[in-house]
Image (spheres, helix red, strand yellow):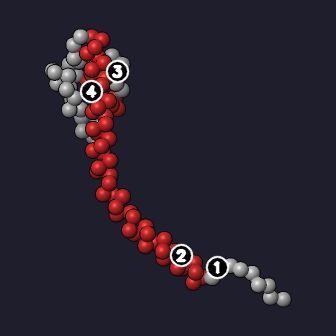
Amino acid sequence: MFKNERAFTLIEMLIVLMIISVLIILIVPNLSDKSEEVHDKGCSALISVVQAQVDAYYIEENRYPSSLTQLESAGYITEDQKACPDGKELNVDDSGKVS
């Protein structure tokens, strides 16, 4: 009549949920602090890529591009490579330095 089935009790399930909740409470605030660091590293990586394209343009044309728009029209970069992920616009100066 009574079967001896092994299963989790309500108390065991509540304990597991409590442990998961505590872990989430500890982990999520640490992740939100890292987003600014990720944007900074993404921007410096993008600057390195665009700088390499400016150098490639210089090798082929024997002059630096006057703007990133000129670099884009020549096919070296795309529209989304003219700004960092956080929205800061990139610029190229007369000496070919990207900032």
Residue 26 appears in view: yes
Residue type of the residue flagged with mark 3: Tyr
Q: Residue at x 21, y 13 (%)?
A: 63
Residue type of the residue flagged with mark 2: Val
Q: Which residue is mark 4?
A: 51
Extreme-left residue of the structure: 94
Q: CA distance from mark 3 to mark 2?
A: 53 Å
Q: CA distance from mark 4 to mark 1?
A: 59 Å
Residue 59 x/y as whole percent = 28, 14
Q: CA distance from mark 4 to mark 3?
A: 11 Å
First of labels 2, 4 by sequence position: 2
Residue 4 x/y as whole percent = 76, 84
Residue 57 x/y as whole percent = 29, 17
Q: Is residue 11 left or right of residue 77?
A: right
Q: Is residue 8 left or right of residue 2?
A: left
Q: Which residue is mark 1?
A: 8
Q: Residues within 10 Å of mark 2 (few under 14, many from 20)?
A: few
Instruction: Give SS at disc 3.
Output: loop
First of labels 4, 3 by sequence position: 4
Q: Residues within 10 Å of mark 3 (few under 14, many from 20)?
A: some
Q: Do labels 1 and 3 touch, CB within 8 Å? A: no
Q: Which mark is residue 76?
A: 3
Q: Residues within 10 Å of mark 1 (few under 14, many from 20)?
A: few
Q: Do labels 4 and 1 touch, CB within 8 Å? A: no
Residue 73 appears in view: no
Q: Is residue 70 above or below residue 82?
A: above
Q: Do labels 2 and 1 touch, CB within 8 Å? A: yes
Q: Which residue is mark 2?
A: 16
